[in-house]
Image (tube, helix red, strand yellow):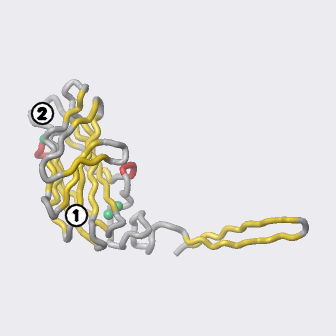
Amino acid sequence: MDTQRYLLSFARGTTVLVLTIFVAACGGGSGSDSDSSPTALSCGDTTEPNDSKPVATAIANRTEDNSEEDQTSSTASGVDDDDFFTYQGTDSPSIIDVVDPNLTIVSSTDDLGFCLYATCLSGTTSLTCPGGTTSATDEDGSPGCCSNTTIQNSIDINSLSCVGAGGDDSSDILIEINTPTDVCVDYTFSTYF
Ligand SMILES: [Ca+2]
Ligand SMILES: [Ca+2]
Ligand SMILES: [Ca+2]
């Protein structure tokens, strides 16, 4: 582990007191652990650091065509690891499909909690959480819905509307995944807009 040394000097008259302080550098843990949380388990995460909305791992942007659904695999490294993924969903005028953002946990090696948040590109974001989910807000106050794999494996928001945007429901989507148990949980999720 890296350490940093700080020298503090105090002079009073002809007496000089020097304090040397060694401080362990935070973050990282062992060399192979790329998670940004110093207390997260070392689980071979490959999408870290993604522990907050500003550093969410970007996945492919898409339109409201559900055939653009794709899958992403990663690892929840214990209870101190939070995983965020983001993409932009475009409400294309040329595509006959509805905006119905979906997050599905395709597979996981243990229980997971998961959330799907939306932020309209223009207008005010409005949505109603479907059964089996609870309302939540992300760190910026954008609305979303959360569930966990002990209840169900997916969240399907078919009520997303950007009020005042003239029918354009294009939105930034934020996905949050974590584990309630302090173990390494490999998972794969799929999402469409
Ligand atoms: Ca859709
Ligand atoms: Ca992770
Ligand atoms: Ca993380």
Residue tagged 1:
112
Query: Residue at point 40% right, 66% down?
Result: 34
Q: Is residue 56 left or right of 110 when viewed as pictured?
A: right
Whether 139 is drawn above or below 149: the answer is: above
The foreground one among 54 and 115 is 115
User: In the rendered structure, which amino acid carries the disc numbered 2?
Assistant: Ile
* Rendered image quadrant of residue 21: bottom right
- Quarter of the rendering occupied by the C terminus: top left
Q: Is residue 176 visible?
A: yes
Residue 94, compared with residue 47, is above or below; it is above
Left or right: 94 in relation to 135: left
Q: Is mark 2 within 8 Å of ligand 1?
A: no
Foreground of the two, 141 or 5: 141
> Which residue is at 19% across, 60% downward?
148
Please state the quadrant of the image where ligand 3 appears.
bottom left
Q: Residues within 10 Å of mark 2 (few under 14, many from 20)?
A: few
